[in-house]
Structures are given as structure tokens and as C-alpha cells.
């Protein structure tokens, strides 16, 4: 379709297309800018870009939140114009750097709560900089440009170029940047600024897989290392291929530490795989599975111990789930996912007093699944928990959902012959009316639906 339209347009002839472009240029600023870019010489395009940057730096006009997305598109178009109009890589590097230097005029006069404008610096400008820098033969100039920009970063967008240095610079250039940043850090009296320089060194060290330098920079930044710091250092050692040192850093974290436990366990899984420690790998995979049972974590376990043990694992885990008195919505969902509907019904009925409608998403899924499987008593008890949650919180915006649940309960009650030790529908209705009869807006909605 696109090629057909292109061929038809080409068939119109140069003069008709030129007239159409000029007509569009009158009607649209964007089209006018495109025309000017197409007919300009490279020198003229550079001058136009510089003039727009000057205007951005000097502008005192405040961009409100509603206008920020449109403003971001204007900035994107400005960069696209640069990309189309400037082919020399060194010139491109210098002009994109000049774009970053407008951050004060741009972000300082803009409500960027949505993040649209900042993202132009973090993504669009970064990609264009990397494109030019990758093709630029003067890598020292590129490195010096990045460092110069990062001497000041009041809006947190310039360090984007540090984080992508490895995409466009060789290791020797990056090590030169590290040396310069280290001198700045050593001579900095302000603790915040010193830490900023060290954080940039960390990023560069990780990019060149210098785990020891990363470790030294993190230690220099903080007197006492947190759990997150131990995990970060271990991750960089693992990325650099030093498995044993990565393992030793994770070993410094107390075993009962829960903060970022999932991140720690991911690293441990990879470490055990690389070390070929099947015993510890199996133990950890079982622990991960039992923290959150799902078909995904089950398969990850079976990938380690063998798919032939699937029935054995499922049998053991179902027995453990049914044996433990607490209610875990994730375990009920797991039972459903492996086709254990009878066991799910048993699990929910025995823990009915622990059903909590505040956990809306999981409870609604369980209720609808039980209803679809004709396990109407279990479905009823879950719908009751959802309705109770709405009424107890007096959440008027959700009353229409509550009415739907009560109507659902009316319908399900007809098919339930054995209520076991649970209140029948009439008794339940009496209880909620006694407790919430004053919520007239709810009951009026319910009666109106009848």
C-alpha cells in the first residue's frame, strides 16, 4: 500500500509535488520546517539548528503539563532535522551536546510531570549522539565532550551519555574518562558532588567489566554497604566472569534478609549453574518455587530436576498446600493452573473465614473460575468477601460492582442445595442489611436492578 502511494506520487511529476509541499508549508509549521530543511545547504541546516537551540536556552515561556507532550514532539522534530541535515559525525556530536546544554532552559521552564520532555533527552538525543559518536574517528573528542557535559547535571539527563559510553567508545577512552572523574572526586569537598562522580565511575567500570573498580567506587561512596550494594557488586563480578568473588559478596548478606531477596536468588541461581553445583541449585529452585508457586516457577524447577518428576512434585506440593492452614491466593491460583479443581474447592472452603475481598484481582479471578466450574458454594463465599469489602469500606464508587456481586449471589443461591456450616443466602442478606442498611445509595442501586 505504501509503495503504491509512493509510485503514484512520483507519477505526478516534480512540479506538482513541489507546489503541494509549498501549500502544506503555509498550513503547517512542521511542514514548513521540513521544506526549509530540504532546500537548505548543510551549513544552513547547522545554522538553523543553532538558532533554535539559542531560542530554547533564552526562552522564558513556561510550558504547562498539558502542553508538554506537544513540546516534546517539537524537540523530537528538532533532533530529526539535525539527523537529516548533518552527516559529519564530529559536527553531529557537538550539536547534540549543545542540545543537552539547553536542559536548563527547557526543563527549567516546563512542567514535565509526565516525563515526555525528559525522555527526549534520555532516549531520542542519546540515540542520535551514539549514532554520531560511533562514526566519529576522534574518540578522545567524544569522551571529552561527555565529560564536559557531566561537570554539571542539574536535571539528571546528561548522565545518560555516561551510561551509554560503552556503545560508542573503546576501553582506553573510557579509562581516560574514569581517571578524569576520579581526580574530580578526589578533589571534591562536597559529599553529594563527590558521590555523583563516583556513581559515574561505577557505570563506566561496569561497562568495561572492571568489577574491582566498581567495588572500590561503591565502597568509596558509602561508609557502610547496604544489601543492595552487596547485590550490585556481586552482579558486576558475575558479569565480568568472576563467579567465586560474586558468590562471596552474596555470602556477606544475612540468610534471613528479605530485602531484594528475589534479586539475590536470581544471581545465586546463575552462580550455581556456572559452578555446576546441582545440589544447591535444586535447593534454591525449590525455595523459589515454594515462595510463589506457578506454572512458570514449576517449569523452572523441572528444568533443573527433570520433567519426568512433574507428577511427583505436583503430588507433594498439592499435599503441602492443603495441609497448611493459611490462605495464599497464589496457591489457589496454582491449583487451578494445574487442573486441580476439586483440591481448589476444598482449599477455599476450609479457609473461607480468611477470604479477603480487599485483594480484588485475585479474589475476582478465583470467584469467576469457581463459578465457571460449577463450584457454586466456593464461588458464593468469594463473592461475599468481595461484597463485604466494598460495604465495610463504604466505597461508593464501587457500589455498582457490589450490586453486581449481590445479584450474582442471588442467582447462585438457587443452585446450592447444601450450605454445610455456612449461612444460607437469606441469612447472609439479613446480616449485611443489619450491618449496612443505612447505605441507602447501595440498596437503591440494588433494588433498581431487580
Image: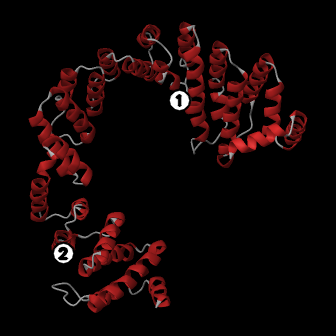
Q: Work out whether residue 344 or residue 186 is closer to the camera in this orientation and state it.
A: 344
Q: Residues within 10 Å of mark 2 (few under 14, many from 20)?
A: some
Front: mark 1 or 2: 2
The circle on residue 239 is none
Q: Which quadrant holds residue 275?
A: top left
Residue at which label 1 appears: 156
Specify whether 387 is left or right of 44. left
* Nearest the eye: 85 or 395: 85
Residue 242, image quadrant: top left
Relative to 410, residue 326 above or below:
above
Asked if one can make out residue 425 in the rendered structure from this viewpoint, the answer is: no
Residue 367 in the figure: left or right of residue 131: left
User: Does residue 4 sit above or below 163 in this rendering?
Assistant: below
Q: Residue at the spot x=56%, y=12% of the render?
A: 142
Mark sitting on residue 349: 2
Rendered location of residue 38, percent (x, y) = 80, 27
Q: Position of residue 273 (x, y in %)?
A: 19, 31
How was this image coloured?
secondary structure
The local secondary structure at tag 2 comes to helix
Q: Residue 191 appears at what percent x and percent y?
A: 42, 21
**Which is nearer the N-term, disc 1 or disc 2?**
1
Q: Quadrant of residue 328?
A: bottom left
Mark-to-mark CA distance, 1 and 2 = 53 Å
**Can residue 313 be seen here?**
yes
Q: Height in image: 140 above or below 428?
A: above
- Assign a secondary structure to mark 1: loop
Q: Are marks 1 and 2 in contact (CB under 8 Å)?
A: no
Amino acid at each position: 500500500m505504501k509503495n503504491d502511494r509512493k509510485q503514484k506520487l512520483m507519477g505526478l511529476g516534480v512540479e506538482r509535488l513541489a507546489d503541494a509541499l509549498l501549500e502544506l508549508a503555509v498550513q503547517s509549521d512542521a511542514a514548513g520546517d521540513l521544506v526549509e530543511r530540504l532546500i537548505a545547504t548543510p551549513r544552513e541546516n547547522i545554522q538553523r539548528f543553532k538558532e533554535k537551540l539559542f531560542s530554547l536556552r533564552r526562552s522564558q515561556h513556561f510550558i504547562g503539563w498539558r502542553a508538554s507532550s506537544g513540546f516534546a514532539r517539537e524537540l523530537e522534530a528538532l533532533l530529526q532535522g539535525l539527523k537529516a541535515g548533518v552527516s559529519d559525525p564530529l559536527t553531529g556530536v557537538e550539536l547534540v551536546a549543545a542540545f543537552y546544554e539547553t536542559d536548563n532552559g527547557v526543563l527549567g521552564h516546563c512542567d514535565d510531570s509526565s516525563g515526555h520532555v525528559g525522555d527526549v533527552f534520555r532516549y531520542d538525543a542519546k540515540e542520535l549522539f551514539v549514532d554520531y559518536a560511533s562514526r566519529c574517528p576522534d574518540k578522545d573528542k567524544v569522551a571529552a565532550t561527555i565529560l564536559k557535559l557531566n561537570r554539571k547535571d542539574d536535571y539528571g539527563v546528561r548522565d545518560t551519555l555516561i551510561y551509554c559510553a560503552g556503545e560508542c567508545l573503546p576501553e582506553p577512552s573510557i579509562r581516560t574518562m574514569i581517571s578524569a572523574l576520579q581526580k574530580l572526586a578526589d578533589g571534591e569537598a562536597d559529599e553529594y558532588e563527590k558521590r555523583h562522580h563516583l556513581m559515574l565511575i561505577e557505570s563506566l567500570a561496569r561497562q568495561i567489566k572492571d568489577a574491582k573498580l566498581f567495588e572500590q567506587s561503591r565502597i568509596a561512596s558509602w561508609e557502610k554497604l547496604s544489601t543492595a550494594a552487596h547485590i550490585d557488586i556481586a552482579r558486576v563480578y558475575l558479569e565480568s566472569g568472576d563467579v567465586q568473588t560474586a558468590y562471596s559478596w552474596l555470602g556477606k548478606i544475612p540468610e534471613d534478609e528479605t530485602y531484594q531477596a528475589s534479586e539475590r536468588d536470581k544471581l545465586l541461581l546463575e552462580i550455581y549453574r556456572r559452578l555446576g553445583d546441582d545440589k544447591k541449585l535444586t535447593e534454591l529452585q525449590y525455595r523459589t518455587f515454594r515462595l510463589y508457586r506457578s506454572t512458570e516457577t514449576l517449569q523452572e524447577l523441572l528444568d533443573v530436576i527433570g520433567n519426568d518428576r512433574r507428577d511427583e512434585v505436583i503430588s507433594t506440593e498439592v499435599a503441602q498446600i492443603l495441609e497448611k492452614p493459611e490462605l495464599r491466593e497464589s496457591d489457589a491460583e496454582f491449583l487451578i493452573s494445574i487442573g486441580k479443581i476439586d483440591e481448589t474447592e476444598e482449599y477455599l472452603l476450609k479457609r473461607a473465614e480468611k477470604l479477603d475481598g480487599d485483594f480484588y484481582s485475585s479474589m475476582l479471578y478465583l470467584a469467576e473460575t469457581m463459578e465457571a466450574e460449577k463450584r457454586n458454594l466456593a464461588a458464593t463465599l468469594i463473592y461475599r468477601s468481595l461484597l463485604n469489602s466494598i460495604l465495610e469500606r463504604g466505597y461508593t464508587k464501587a457500589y455498582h460492582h457490589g450490586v453486581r456481586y449481590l445479584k450474582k449471589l442471588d442467582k447462585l443461591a438457587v443452585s446450592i442445595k447444601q450450605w454445610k456450616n455456612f449461612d444460607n443466602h437469606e441469612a447472609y442478606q439479613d446480616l449485611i442489611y443489619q450491618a449496612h442498611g443505612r447505605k441507602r445509595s447501595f440498596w437503591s442501586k440494588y433494588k433498581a436492578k431487580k
